[in-house]
Image (cartoon, rainbow, N blue to C red):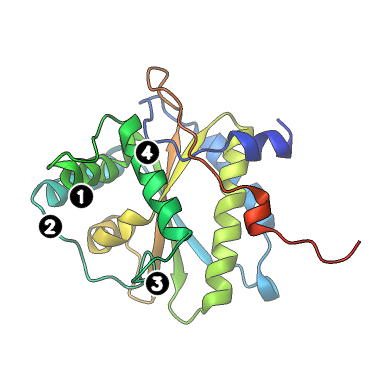
Amino acid sequence: MDVYEAVDSRRAVRAFSDEPVARDVLDRVLAAATRAPSSGNLQPWRVYVVTGEPLAALKRRATARARAGDPGDDREYPMYPAELVPPYRDRFAAAAAQRYAALGIARDDADRPAKIATLNSAAFGAPVVLFCYLDRTMGPGQWADAGMYLQTVMLLLRAEGLHSCPQVMWTMYRTTVGETTGADDGLVLLCGLAVGHEQDRVPPLRTDRADMTETVRFIGP
């Protein structure tokens, strides 16, 4: 699989099979991802890979919180700006409608928030979740570096025939995650990344993207 194919086929998959992911594949992907760029070569990411019974127990605890209507831990950073303005608000709304309609959750379903939270807290059935942290002393530049690292990981996973789904939702249950990872208070949870094989019975979903002309401007010949 070449880079263009990996980029084109990468999707946030929200329905994983229970097929396990081999440890040597994860080792290969994460070793290669160390080549991701970072300003000053700080390599600010700290990653915890959770599988097996530790992950199953974490899913149970997080799902129990979600089903109980727990609003989650105090946010350490906002997922989105307080007020999204067009075109960002429109893109967000359209993508949300596409995502959850594909999972059979109607927009007007009164239980929609609880159903979404439950699916998320189960990592959509993924057998592996990577939790990415950063040192609290790091700034916006290093958060951008972590994003480049995670994108590198996601593309390498595609090269291995695997799929993934980045989940900022896990920050809502960061204390529960911390009980599993053992990450100390000097680290802030950026997100989780669900990893695995996509379920065959679930129709693949590709959310729409803005045309390149909306986001790119060429200056010069």
Residue drawn 41% across and 45% down? 95
User: Of the numbered discs in the image, which one, if any, rests on residue 99?
Assistant: 4
Q: Is residue 138 left or right of residue 36?
A: left
Q: Are marks 3 and 4 in contact (CB under 8 Å)?
A: no
**Mark 4 crowdedness (10 Å alpha carbons): few <14, some 14-19, many ≥20:** some
Vertical order, 83 against 69 (above or below) = below
Residue drawn 68% across and 53% down? 213
| Residue 27 locus on image (x, y percent) | 56, 43
Which marked residue is nearer to the observer: mark 4 or mark 1?
A: 4
Vertical order, 76 against 2 (above or below) = below
Quadrant where the N terminus is found in the figure: top right
Q: Which residue is mark 2?
A: 70
Which mark is first along the chain, 1 or 3?
1
**Which secondary structure lies at badge 4?**
helix
Q: Is residue 85 left or right of residue 44?
A: left
Which mark is first along the chain, 2 or 3?
2
Question: Is residue 187 among the parts visible in the rendering?
Answer: yes
Image quadrant in which you'd find residue 43: bottom right
Which marked residue is nearer to the observer: mark 2 or mark 1?
A: 2
User: Of the numbered discs in the image, which one, if any, rests on residue 187?
Assistant: 3
Residue closest to the far front: 86
Give whichever of 24, 221 is nearer the camera: 221
Q: Amino acid at mark 2?
A: Asp
**Which secondary structure lies at badge 3?**
strand
**Mark 1 crowdedness (10 Å alpha carbons): few <14, some 14-19, many ≥20:** many
For the residues marked 3 and 2, what is the alpha-carbon distance in whole angstroms? 23 Å
Q: Amino acid at mark 4?
A: Arg
Give whichever of 40, 208 is nearer the camera: 208
**Mark 3 crowdedness (10 Å alpha carbons): few <14, some 14-19, many ≥20:** some
Which mark is first along the chain, 2 or 4?
2
For the residues marked 4 and 1, what is the alpha-carbon distance in whole angstroms? 21 Å
Q: Which residue is mark 1?
A: 62
